[in-house]
Image: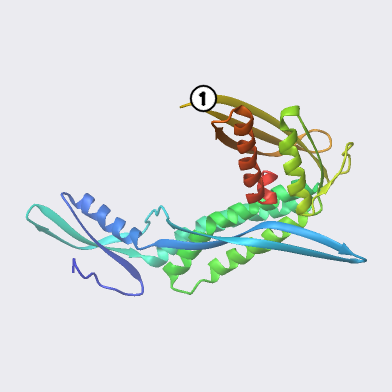
Amino acid sequence: WFLSPPEDNVHLFGAGEGATRKEAERHALSEIAERLYVSVSSEFSTSASQSIAGDKSTFESSSRKRITTKSLPIDFVAYSTIQSEEDAGKIYVLVAVDRFAQAEKVGADVKRAMGRVSELDSAFELEKSPLRKAKSLAASIKTLEEIRPKALLKDALEGSGAPLYASVSEMASQRQKRLYETISTISASIKGDAESQRFRDILSTRLSDEGFRLTPEPCLDISCVKFLVTAKSRKTEEDGAVKVKTEYNIEVTDPDGAALTGSYFSSTGASFAGEEEAAGKALEKAREQVYASSLAEILGL
């Protein structure tokens, strides 16, 4: 029974050994937990664009796929030791976990998170500012992404296919599309200190390439946001090479100057030819980071 635990549709079985009964039970539960690894495939939009021809508006987005595999911390709520044996100073146990009681516990966690999603959806409907709407959507998507593994775990415990996981995934996908549709309605002005000028040029081009509407000051419309970019550089020397590290801080505010979101980029360049070339390499790395970031990431969502 220790090497070949039984199987049925009601329990999850695990065997463990230890110097004490408690230690053996802990190892048995760990063995069960290790079998409950959850592999989750997530799709995140990285770009969006909108084109207008006559009275028709076309919205397009592209996406990338990121797959993560994680072992969830599991708090077993209903288990019992159904067999035990002591041999050569060690205790061997067989533990059975009630899979449906465990599924109910996981389901309660999902239900609480879904309540949070409902609150954020309500906030989205009440907001008038597109960026504030986008913040609510981004928080909702984050919450849904966090509970997707638990939804998949609940489905696995119940042995009912993956209806809850499919539902949560569809909700996240719908809000992801709505997020970029909302972002596409935002216009922005960009200003900052003198040191950030070249980075702001990169940022402006990146946003323009995505169909983001840039507007000069004053930026007073409710759909308009202000980007305030500041830069800070630090030079060091190591083994004859000059290193320049530049940090760019982006603060996004509403027309009245109230901070809404923000993002941060940092890059380092090194050169034996001097500070100017090192700074140029750092700027080029910053360009790569900006173009590798989605609009939502640039906006700090």
The N terminus sits in image quarter: bottom left
Q: Position of residue 121 (x, y in %)?
A: 70, 55
Q: On screen, 239 above or below 134? A: above
Estimate how packed mark 1 is, as few (under 14), some (14 to 19) or many (20 or more) residues with alpha carbons within 10 Å: some
Residue visible at 64% across and 36% down? Answer: 280
Q: Nearer the viewer, residue 39 or 193?
A: 193
Farthest left residue? 88
Q: Which quadrant of the structure image shows residue 284?
A: top right
Q: Is residue 251 above or below residue 68?
A: above
Q: Residue at x 8, y 52 (%)?
A: 89
Kind of residue at disc 1: Glu
Count of marks, rendered view: 1
* SS category of the residue bearing label 1: strand
Q: Nearer the viewer, residue 14 or 246?
A: 246
Q: Quadrant of residue 6?
A: bottom left
The colour scheme of the drawn protein is rainbow
Side (left or right) of 233 relative to 229: left
Q: Residue 144: x percent and y percent?
A: 59, 57
Up-down: is 140 above or below 54? above
The vertical placement of 167 against 181, above or below, is below
Between residue 231 and residue 46, name the one nearer to us. 231
Q: Residue 286: where, in percent of width, then height?
A: 63, 41
Q: Residue at x 12, y 53 (%)?
A: 90
Q: Identify residue for label 1.
A: 237
